[in-house]
Amino acid sequence: MSQVSEYADVSAVTPSGDHLWSAEIDPGWTILGNPNGGYLQTVMARAAVAEAEAGGTTDDGSHPHIVAASTHFLRSPRPGPVELVSERMRTGRTTTQVRVRMIQANQITGESLFTLGELTAADIDWTTLNLPDPGAPFSDCTRFTPPREQFPVEILHRAGLYLHPGQTALTEGKPRGLGEVRAWVELPDGENFTPESLLLAADILPPAPFDIRPGGWVPTIELSTYIRAVPVPGPVNVLLTANLIQGDRVDESATVWDAAGNLVAQSHQFAGIRFT
């Protein structure tokens, strides 16, 4: 039997009925006791992929990869068992759309819409975006693991977060006013990233507003992620930027490159915010 890596294991789903799946939310992938949004999105994505596989394929082939995900978080589930209800909405020539709801204690905790297709390691053909530079190489970055007694962020004791140089908001408590965080991300035991686990990478960095003023509360309300290509083996490089803070809301954008420098994912999220 092949060994199951930790992230694949803790985000796995098991069939429990027609269009029903069960999963176990692991306490090791939490922030202040709350499961990370990208982790929850990955669990729902596993159910979407399983639903698409159960529905068969079209004459033009299968749609094995998550290519777009949009999740509304209604409430935070607690670590422990959850149920997932999936609905295949459409299968076309190039994409399949699946809706997934996560339920705990008879309450919906989140709902996602996924688009599945087939990804390759594709180059960018054209863009009007002023894409940022990937920044420092992995070898120049240092792992950041906050002490549990000060910051109970269990997820960073599982996944490795390697900060680019100069991240003084996190390492010294000195925000620079740039509103950005840069880091390489590594899964446990050298597990390679997949389209599903890129959903975690796009949401695992500490909130970018921490580089503006110290904050203690940034719950995700809605998270949309686009998977652009299959990543090469190795860690991924992430830039998270705060775009606009207005009242008690903030929106952030993430750009994710693989170890070869290919852009493999982008995300945009809308969140609540409260500065300390």
Image: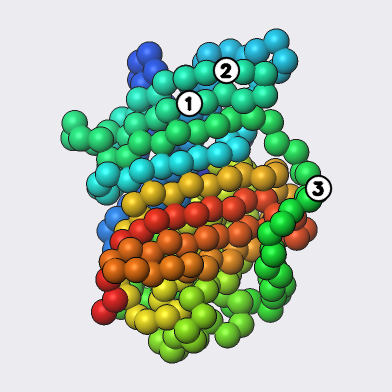
Left or right: residue 110 versus residue 157 is left
- Dot 3 amino acid type: Asp
Q: Nearer the viewer, mark 2 or mark 3?
A: 3
Q: At x 77% / y 44%, what residue is drawn?
A: 121
Q: Which mark is residue 153?
A: none
Residue 191 appearing in the image: no
Verify CB contact (< 8 Å) between mark 2 and mark 3.
no
Q: At x 43% / y 61%, what residue is drawn?
A: 251
Q: Position of residue 101 (x, y in %)?
A: 34, 31
Q: Quick one: label 2 or label 3, which is nearer the N terminus?
A: 2
Q: CA distance from mark 1 to mark 2?
A: 9 Å
Q: Is residue 59 above or below residue 246?
A: above
Q: Position of residue 77 (x, y in %)?
A: 27, 45
Verify CB contact (< 8 Å) between mark 1 and mark 3.
no
- Dot 2 amino acid type: Thr
Residue 249 appearing in the image: yes
Kindly state the secondary structure of the residue where label 1 is placed. Answer: strand
Q: Which residue is mark 3?
A: 125
- Dot 1 amino acid type: Val
Q: Quick one: label 1 or label 3, which is nearer the N terminus?
A: 1
Q: Quick one: label 1 or label 2, which is nearer the N terminus?
A: 2
Q: Which residue is mark 2?
A: 91
Left or right: residue 129 versus residue 70 is right
Kindly state the secondary structure of the residue where label 3 is placed. Answer: loop
Dividing the picture into quadrants, the one containing residue 24 is top left
Q: Is residue 14 above or below residue 82?
A: above
Q: Quadrant of the N terminus?
A: top right
Q: Nearer the viewer, mark 1 or mark 3?
A: 3
Q: Which mark is residue 98?
A: 1
Q: CA distance from mark 2 to mark 3?
A: 27 Å
Disc 3 packing (10 Å; few <14; some 14–19; many ≥20): few
